Image (tube, rainbow, N blue to C red):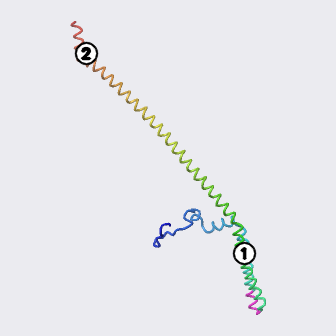
Amino acid sequence: MGEPVNPFTKEVPSSFADNQQYFDESRWQKLGRRLKEEPLIPLVDFVAGCAVTCWALWGATKSIRRGDSYNAQKMFRMRLYGQFFTIVAMVAGSFYYNSDRILRKEYEAVVQERKAQEKRSAWIRELEARDMEEKDWREKVEKVTEKRLEDEETARIKEEARAREGGPVTKAVKGLKDRIQ
């Protein structure tokens, strides 16, 4: 089983927790989206069903004020038929659009997978670019280090050669020694 839910926390587990679109949509945006996805349900439900129900209630009110109980009962039955039609239309629309909902969810899953794959490949490209930059940087550092070592080696060799030759005093003594001989 899952973790027990702490009733004193403000966060309530929700099926919408992973759906960012739920949090980004206003009520009007959601209504517009739902009208585009399932255009027959509001058309049939609200236009036909609600219109018939409202017309029947209006007619029943007029009949009751006139004292015509036969027409009042007829309008009340019409109201029930209108409400029944509304419920039947909602259930039928739900069944009709169920396959579309399933296909849309599958499509959204494929799109989400593609986005994740693109994100992953972009991340890998970024890592490869950083790796190439690091390799280039290491090569430059190695070249500079080799150049510095060569310069130090050259300087050390020159210093050793000067030390073998000696300084100005040593040269003067050698020069005197050569004259004497």
- Give how far across and how far down residue 115 sits, in percent: 59, 53
Residue labelled with disc 1: 88
The quadrant of the image that shows the C terminus is top left
**Eyeballing the image, is 174 above or below 15?**
above
Snapshot quadrant of residue 156: top left
- Give how far across and how far down residue 48 sits, in percent: 75, 75
Comparing 138 with 147, the one in front is 138
Magenta range: 60-67
Image-based side of 164 in relation to 154, left or right: left
Q: Secondary structure at mark 1?
A: helix
Residue labelled with disc 2: 171
Q: Name the disc covering residue 134, or none.
A: none
Q: Secondary structure at mark 2?
A: helix
Seen at 66% across and 62% down, the residue is: 102
Comparing 157 with 107, the one in front is 107
Our reading of the magenta stretch's main secondary structure is helix
- Give how far across and how far down residue 17 sits, in percent: 54, 64
- Count how many numbered circles sit on residues in the image: 2
Q: Residue furthest top?
A: 181
Image-based side of 20 in relation to 55, left or right: left
Of circles 1 and 2, which is in front? 1
Seen at 73% across and 82% down, the residue is: 80
Image-based side of 155 in relation to 138, left or right: left
**Eyeballing the image, is 156 above or below 57?**
above
Snapshot quadrant of residue 31: bottom right
Which amino acid type is shown beneath numbered disc 2? Answer: Lys
Seen at 22% across and 14% down, the residue is: 173
Q: Residues within 10 Å of mark 2 (few under 14, many from 20)?
A: few
